[in-house]
Amino acid sequence: MAIHERSLVEPERIVRKERLVIDGVDVSGDWNLIILPRVINDYDLDFAKEIINSPDGKTINQCYQCSYCTASCPVHNYWDERYNPRHFIYLARLGMIDELQKRADVMWRCVSCHKCTHRCPKGVLVEEVLKVILRTMAKKGLIDEYPSKKFDKFFTESVLEYGRIEDGELLFGWIEKQGYNVVKDPILKKPIPFLGETPEWLKQLVMKPIKSMNVSFLVLNAKHMLFHPRTKNWNKFKQVLRKVMQEEGALT
Amino acid sequence: MGVIGKRVAYYPGCSLEGAARSYDVSTKIVARELGLELDYLEDYNCCGAMESKNVTFMGTMLLNARNMSLARKQGHDVIVAPCNGCSFSLQRAEYFLQTDGKVFERVNSLLREGGVDPLDKIPETYHILEWFYHEAGPQKVKEKTKRPLRGLKVANYYGCLYTRPHFYAKTYAHAGGQEEEVRPRRRETADDDEHPYYMNALLEAAGATSVEFEPMHTQCCGGPHSLSDEQVSEKFVMMILQTAKRNGADIIATECPLCHASLEMYRHRLMMKGVPDVDVPAAYFTQLLGLAFGYSANDVKLKDNLSDPLPVLKRLGLA
């Protein structure tokens, strides 16, 4: 198959020579650039099928590669040009897993702003499709753990356990997962914001309501940190939720 | 106007009962002043926000279907959520439940299994800003304003998911791509999709001046990655704050607790790094409306805002 995607041409496959004679014809000068042929035969066609079969990924086949999503994408425009939603959809549909894997370090960077989905002229749920691609890759073990997935799982587990989330626990729990040494009290195992090596900005932010003597705010949040807010009658529903998530392979 | 209903189910979301308490309190104040009634959704659960949906599809459908079922039990057809993430999640579930019969059936049987009433009808979700605009409107806000926000230059920050994507928020009728029955339709009450103006209109009715803020008014703040992808979030927030400051804004008005927290957190970090032009404070639009309606800074809990908008408001004699 011909390569018609410029970014699929690896730098080492581009050859430039000072003097080049082919079949007795001197092609030096502007004509001396050669792209070495490349054979691809490991298309994983089941990969696209799996995406199409999921309810949130089935619009992937409507894509006609116009690149409106990429043009709208803030991560592409303001952060890293290698983040290219159109290209990821292209690769996923072809089943070129190795090419997706080469971009694993930027693929997770989607901030879910939905500009792509909103503007797509073909009605592709682009953001959902990209997340399904990532989810499927993770499920098949084709991609290493990435920061946003760690956070997503951490968040979802908190929802599953209590029915509600709590900002303080989320913040300090995440800091701890980042490798900071968060000190917890011995009985309730709750983080103590002022001890341990919390980052400086977080310490200063925690100090703000204390400095302004905002007592009711402090009491409310301390109460929530000590006694996690819960949804009543959650247990039976939790079982069903856990079962569904296990079916999808979301809990490992 | 008046097509949504004066009495609706109120889904505050987890954030508003904790760190974003000020948004909850000021929303209730504004609703009461405007003659609208919020019926608290008893025993709700988290919507899954932007995080859970990346891990599990059916799980988020179930989480939101449970909330919808609770709203139906309380006799409501309309849910109002003040958070972009919550309204997005509910609207997303609404979209898939309506367009995918298989998902709907599966969700209903799972709800029954989990001891929750199955859905007889799928309630519609609105963002609270849309509801305020359509059930009360700028005219009513003008009537109720006792202390106009004169001289206050506001940058109205809408965030991503208030108008996007049109499939869920119903802000835009799309022509192409999908089959007739699943093709989205524009909701009559919906805000403009690329140039939202409801918050501008309400705050201007209360006497404030809106500064030019496009296209940063719907630029992402980092959203679900505010904690997991610090570099990108920091850059996005820097762009938002600097645009606001350089366009002459005194304050940024927000309408989502996640955007608000992200702006405040990164504002602090950027200031620590000595980045110029990022010192614009943020306040919820309901807090500003509350001030205009004659409530004190303490009533709308302005102290809760970590970016501390009090000095700016005091300078203009508004708090």
Image: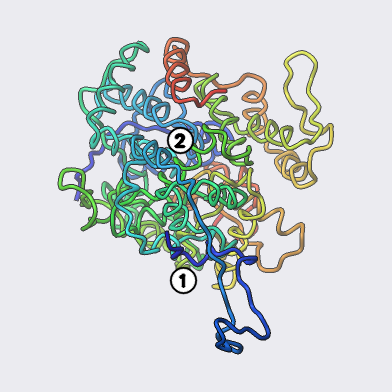
Give the left or right position of residue B265, taking residue B34 as reference: right
Outermost residue, right side:
A196
Dot 2 and dot 1 residues touching (CB under 8 Å)? no
Spot occupied by residue A48 in the image (x, y as percentages of width and height): 39, 42
Give the left or right position of residue A170, taking residue B202 as reference: right
Query: On the image, numbered disc 2 is attached to which residue?
Result: B53
Quadrant of the image for the C terminus of chain B? bottom right
> Of circles 2 and 1, which is in front?
2
Colour mapping used in the image: rainbow
Residue type indicated by callout 1: Glu
Under circle 1, the secondary element is: loop
Q: Chain of mark 2?
A: B
- On screen, residue A24 above or below A235: below
Residue located at (39% from left, 57% from top): B199
Q: Quadrant of residue A26?
A: bottom right
Residue B106, numbered label: none
- On screen, residue A232 above or below B146: above
Q: Nearer the viewer, residue A166 or B224?
A: B224
Residue type indicated by callout 2: Lys
Gap in Å between the C-alphas at discs 2 and 1? 34 Å
Query: On the image, numbered disc 1 is attached to which residue?
Result: B212
| First in sequence: mark 2 vs mark 1 | 2
Q: Nearer the viewer, residue A90 or B126?
A: A90
Give the left or right position of residue B42, taking residue A76 as reference: left
Q: Are marks 2 and 1 on the same chain?
A: yes
Q: Nearer the viewer, residue A91 or B19?
A: A91
Give the left or right position of residue B25, taking residue B113 as reference: right
- Note whether residue B13 is visible: yes
